[in-house]
Image: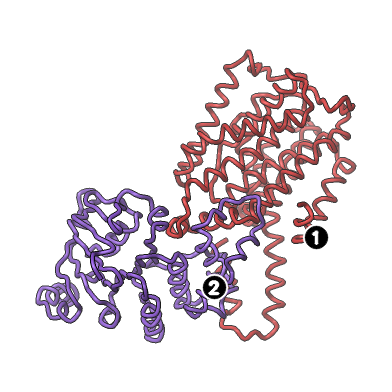
Chain colours: A red, B purple
Amino acid sequence: MILSMLARRPVPAVAGLAVALALPWLIYPPVAMDIACWALFAAAVDLLLGFTGLLSFGHAAFWGGAAYTAGLIALHTGLPFPAAVLGGALLAALLAVPIGYLSVRLRGIYFAMVTLAFAQMVYFVANQWRDVTGGENGLQGIPRELFGLDLSDPFYFYYAGLPFVLAGFFVAWRIVRSPFGRVLVSIRDNPARARALGYPVDRYKLLAFVLSAALSGVAGGLFAISHGFASLQEVYWTTSGQVVMMVVLGGIGTLWGGALGAALIVELNDRLATAGFEETGIITGAIFMLVVLVFRRGIWGTVRHLLASRAGASRAAAPEPSDNKPANSDTLSDARA
Amino acid sequence: MDGPVLRARGLVKEFRGFRAVDGVDLDVAEGSVHALVGPNGAGKTTLFNLLTGFLRPSAGSVRLEGRELAGLSPERIARLGVARSFQITSLFAELTPRQHVELALAGRTGLGWRFWKSDRALGRFSGRADELLERVGLADHAHVPAASLAYGRKRALELALALALDPKVLLLDEPTAGMGVEDVDRTVDLVRRVRDGRTVVLVEHNMNVVASLADRVTVLQHGRVLAEGPYAEIRRDPRVVAAYLGDSDAAR
């Protein structure tokens, strides 16, 4: 399975894998785990934003819902942490069915607002249902059980958790490069045309929404296990906003770009917090504005565009017996971006 | 041929009190080419959208071989055998013509749901896709992004997409809109070739195209049927002449 990904995109896949494996040697291991979780979360959101054309502003419901669920499973059943993470993902997917059903038929800002409203309802429930969620105290002391192995060292836990993130990335990549992914892109670009071809657009969007929620759930569940607690912050609307920001920073519709956005923001927040700087939002906000204004394709999107136009330029240099003027297609792709 | 394959009765579409389509009856005979003509704003495109489910009629019925279509979704109607092209070229910018046609061919199978499979699975339609592209003269342009195709070729791809659905009824919304003379002739030829075993409804402004293709013509004005009959009859109908003159010349 993974082999097919390596075969199709060998250089980025190997490079990404190498960075993922080396990360806890390079930076503080708990921060590395945070980056991995947020990176998967961002990829899940990009599945909707970049490949389906849906801007969800309520994905905290799935990340946070899974964080609480994974925490509860680990606390009360003593099952190994992978079962807790998968349980969290399952809950996120189930939660996404009614929320998606009621929201995917809405367009643009209305979709964003309705998903935000549902996420606020989840936040309300998490805050009020103190017996289960611990209210403002959150869930504390979540164990990291794995067949009696000692995973208390974050360095080792990183390698225990990484397979989930990699598997999640593989699933996201598989979805994007599947017949289903092709239909999603066509829906993003032209929903009326997709319907005229016989595709039930709303049902496709619903499945994309549920898959995205499930992957967000894997990320959120792992995050809770890694920290040993789940708090209201996980279901708060700023979490939904932060993940969208990571996707935009990295590049919408690039899938891997979100990982760069996650690395940038998580690492920056950590450094600023260590330095005693409280108002991290000012810095991340400024970077965000800079990227949106200057590099509208995001970090990864800009790099990819530069590589593509270099390749395009060398192709254009060779004489081509075709009536498709490269200059013309360039302006078209600029207009679309 | 006996009995209309597509039949509309008392079709009405109201937009906030304005009746864009106002009690239209339409019988499209099986195997025929039926043209809808009329001045701008006569309700042709609205009627098209009613027949294909993109708009829900305020009143009236549309039947395909006796089966009620009014109220069904566009994707449902497409699957039942009514395919349409769009007046304003409507494609997927990043996909190539071949990918477009593969997607259209895959629409009737469940392949589109397989999120766990490689998109190479769509390659099983590539043979048929190439045939269709060949048929509309796009074989040499199968691998460039649709956004970079010349206008006439985009229109040809529209037609290939509609054909890929292998519809009983093919609805073409101004297939020659904005084309040069050469492309118009090619498109007329194309429609003539694909009409075999099919029913075609087309909205068309170019009267030469209507004259050379249509078996029957329905003239719309102000959302109503003004006249209906073979082209030779219609063009002499004083009401039709008045409607067209009134629309284009009186304004000057």
| Left or right position of A335 against A87 | left
Image disc number at residue A11:
1
Name the quadrant containing residue B129: bottom right
Q: From where the camera sits, is residue A27 visible?
A: yes
Q: Quadrant of the C terminus of chain B?
A: bottom left
Spot occupied by residue A255 in the image (x, y as percentages of width and height) = 67, 51
Spot occupied by residue A334 in the image (x, y as percentages of width and height) = 58, 66
Residue occupying the point 53% across, 47% down: A54
A264 relative to B242, above or below = above
Name the quadrant containing residue B119: bottom right
Q: From where the camera sits, is residue A290 visible?
A: no
A305 relative to A311, above or below = above
B84 relative to B210, above or below = above
Image disc number at residue B148:
2
Residue occupying the point 53% across, 69% down: B147
Q: CA distance from mark 1 to mark 2?
A: 29 Å
Tell me the amino acid under the disc marked 1: Val
B61 relative to B81, above or below = above
| Along the viewing direction, whichever of B172 and A259 lies nearer the viewer | B172
In the structure shown, which secondary structural element does the residue marked by tag 2 occupy? Answer: helix
Residue occupying the point 54% across, 28% down: A120
Q: Quadrant of the N terminus of chain B?
A: bottom left
Tell me the amino acid under the disc marked 2: Ser
Categorize mark 2 by other alpha carbons within 10 Å: few (<14), some (14-19), many (20+): many
Chain of the residue where label 1 is placed in the rendered structure: A
| Left or right position of B17 against B5 | left
Name the quadrant containing residue B228: bottom left
Chain of the residue where label 2 is placed in the rendered structure: B
Residue furthest toward the front? B2
Categorize mark 1 by other alpha carbons within 10 Å: few (<14), some (14-19), many (20+): few
